[in-house]
Image (cartoon, rainbow, N blue to C red):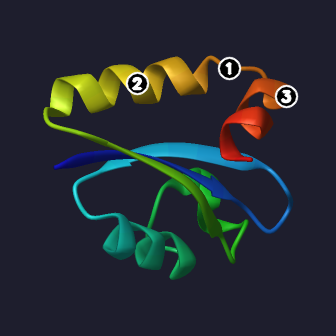
Amino acid sequence: MHYVYVLECADGSLYTGYTTDVERRVREHDAGEGAKYTRGRTPVELRHTEAYETKSAAMSREYEIKQFSRARKERLIE
């Protein structure tokens, strides 16, 4: 499976990413080994996940979520 996830960083910002293993990826972000954006914003909290059969579908959804306004992302993770 392929996953899109949304993290809430320690500074309150939201980060959207793609992975095939959500738990591992969250651990990497928390350890400062994830995306450059999250390195100075730990700890992170997983707020939302979506599963997809194909990498292409997941990557398309990741891009779509990244285009959302902050308010729309907040509605998504509620």
Check the image and report above or below for 26 versus 7. below
Q: Residue 1, image x and y in percent?
A: 16, 49
In the rendered image of this protein, does residue 20 appear above or below residue 60?
below
In this picture, residue 31 sits left or right of residue 69: left
Identify which amino acid the numbered label 2 is placed on: Arg
State how far apart marks 3 and 2 are (Cα).
17 Å
Percent from the top left, x then y, of residue 14? 71, 47
At 73% across and 66% down in the image, what residue appears? Answer: 41
Label 3 secondary element: helix
Q: Earlier in the sequence, mark 1 or mark 2?
A: 2
**Residue, disc 1:** 68
Which residue: 24% across, 24% down?
A: 57
Report how far apart the C-alphas of labels 1 and 2 lie in the structure.
11 Å
**Between 49 and 15, which is closer to the camera in this rendering?**
49
* Residue closest to the eye, 36 or 20: 20
Q: Quadrant of residue 28?
A: bottom left
